[in-house]
Image (spheres, grey):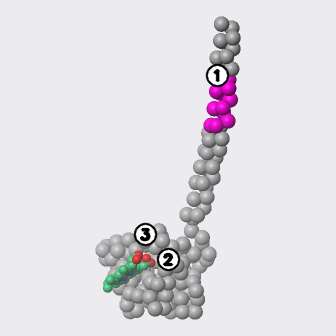
Amino acid sequence: MENYIIAILVIVLVGLFIKNILFAPLSTHDPLSNVQQTANAAKEDEPIVEGRFTPKSLYKFNGFDTENIYIAVKRNVYDVSKARQFYGPSGPYSNFAGHDASRGLAKNSFEMDVIRSYGEPIDDLADLTPEELESLNGWESTFKSKYPVVGVLVDE
Ligand code: HEM
C-alpha cells in the first residue's frame, strides 16, 4: 500500500516536472514576445517624417530627375516612389508627381490646370464642395494606407 502511494506521488511529480518543461516557455515567453511584436508594429506604422517641403522643393521630386517621387495630399507629403507606373514620367498620373495633388483628387481630375503649380502659394482648398472634400478624404485614406509620409508641405 505504501509503495502504491509512493508510486502515485512519483507519477504526479514527474507529470508536474514534464508539464513545466513543456509549458513554461509558452507562458513566460509568449506574452513578452507579443509585447515586443506590438511595439515593433507600432514603430513600423509610424510615419517617418523627413522634413518640410515648400511647393518648390517638392517639385524636385517629380520623378523626371529623381528616383523618388513625392506627392502632397492635404499638406502631408507621401513617398509614392513604389508606384512609378502611376506617377512616373510616363504614368497616367504623372501630373501629380512633385505637386500638391489635393485639388485634382478632390475634383477627380489630373489636368494640369486643376493642379496647383509649384510656383503658387499652397492651395487652401477653401472653395471645395462637400462632395469634393469627401472625394479628397477618400483619396487621402488610400494614400495613408499605401504610402509612407515623408514630411509636410509648408509655404516658403
Ligand atoms: C478614364 C478614367 C480612369 C480609369 C479607367 C482609371 C483607372 C485606374 C486604375 C486601373 C487604377 C489602378 C488601381 C490599382 O491597381 O490599384 C487607377 C488608380 C488611380 N487613379 Fe485612376 N482611372 C481613371 C481616371 C482617374 C482620374 C480622373 C483620376 C484623378 C483624380 C484618377 C486618379 C487615380 C489615382 C490617384 C489612382 C491611385 C494610384 C495609387 O494607388 O497610388 N484616375 N485608376
Q: Earlier in the sequence, mark 1 or mark 2?
A: 1
Q: CA distance from mark 3 to mark 1?
A: 58 Å
Which contiguous range is marked in magenta? 11-23
Looking at the rendering, the quadrant in which ligand 1 lies is bottom left
**Residue beneath the point at 68% across and 23% down:** 13
Left or right: 145 as drawn, with respect to 3? left
**Residue in the image at 52% along x and 88% along y:** 62
The residue that disc 2 covers is 75
Residue 29: horizontal and vertical position, in percent?
65, 44
- Residue type, numbered disc 2: Arg
User: What residue do we see at 62% from left, 39% from top?
Assistant: 27
User: Mark 1 belongs to which amino acid?
Assistant: Val
Q: Amino acid at mark 3?
A: Ser
- Image quarter in which the C terminus is found: bottom right
| Viewer-nearest of discs 2 and 3 | 3
Dot 1 falls on a residue whose secondary structure is: helix
Residue corresponding to mark 1 = 12
Q: Please state which of the two labelled residues, at mark 3 or mark 1, is closer to the viewer.
A: 1
User: Which mark is on residue 141?
Assistant: 3
Q: Nearer the viewer, residue 9 or 40?
A: 9
Location of residue 149 with respect to 28 vertically, above or below: below
Toward the viewer: 32 or 134? 32
Number of residues whose C-alpha sits closer than 10 Å to that of mark 2, classed few (under 14), some (14–19) or many (20 or more): many
Q: Are marks 3 and 1 in contact (CB under 8 Å)?
A: no
Q: Is residue 93 above or below residue 42?
A: below
Q: Quadrant of residue 94?
A: bottom left
Side of 46 where 86 appears, left or right = left
Indicate the position of residue 124 as horizontal and vertical percent values. 43, 80
Quarter residue 65 falls in: bottom right
Rendering coords of residue 141 (x, y %): 43, 69
The quarter of the displayed image where residue 20 is located = top right
Q: Secondary structure at mark 2?
A: loop
